[in-house]
Amino acid sequence: MIRRIVGWILALATLAIIVFAVMNRGNYRSMLASGSTAEQMTAGEQPVGQPEP
C-alpha cells in the first residue's frame, strides 16, 4: 500500500513538472548571463567583443 502511495506521489510530481515546463516554455532566461550582458541582448545589441553573425 505504501509503494502505491509513493508511486502516485511520484507520478503526480512528474506530471506537475511537465505542466510547469510547458507553461513556461517561451520565458527562458539564462541564469549564467550577467545583468549588463542580459540587458544588451534583450535590447538586440551584441555584447562587446562578440562578432555579429
Image (cartoon, helix red, strand yellow):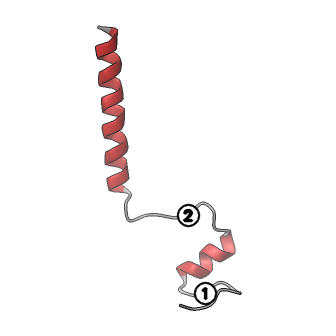
What secondary structure is marked by label 1? Answer: loop
- The residue drawn where x is 31% and y is 47% is 19
Q: Earlier in the sequence, mark 1 or mark 2?
A: 2
Say if 30 sits above or below 12 in the image: below
Q: Position of residue 17 (x, y in %)?
A: 37, 43
Asked if the residue at tag 2 contacts the one at tag 1, i.e. Cβ–Cβ closer than 8 Å, the answer is: no
Say if 33 sits above or below 19 in the image: below
- The residue drawn where x is 63% and y is 63% is 32
- The residue drawn where x is 46% and y is 63% is 28
Q: Crowdedness of circle 2 by 10 Å Cα count: few (<14), some, many (20+)?
A: few
Q: Is 44 situated left or right of 50 in this image?
A: left
**Depth check, front residue: 2 or 29:** 2
Q: Amino acid at mark 2?
A: Ser
**Depth check, front residue: 27 or 52:** 52
- The residue drawn where x is 33% and y is 46% is 18
Q: Position of residue 20 (x, y in %)?
A: 36, 48
Q: Residue furthest bottom?
A: 52
The residue indicated by pointer 1 is 46
Say if 13 sits above or below 31 in the image: above
Q: Quadrant of residue 15?
A: top left
What secondary structure is marked by label 2? Answer: loop
Say if 30 sits above or below 47 in the image: above
Q: Crowdedness of circle 1 by 10 Å Cα count: few (<14), some, many (20+)?
A: some
Q: CA distance from mark 1 to mark 2?
A: 16 Å
The residue indicated by pointer 2 is 30
Q: For the N terminus, give its image quadrant.
A: top left
Q: Is 45 situated left or right of 8 in this image?
A: right
Q: Amino acid at mark 1?
A: Gln
Q: Which mark is residue 36?
A: none
Q: Position of residue 30 (x, y in %)?
A: 56, 64
Q: Quadrant of residue 24?
A: bottom left
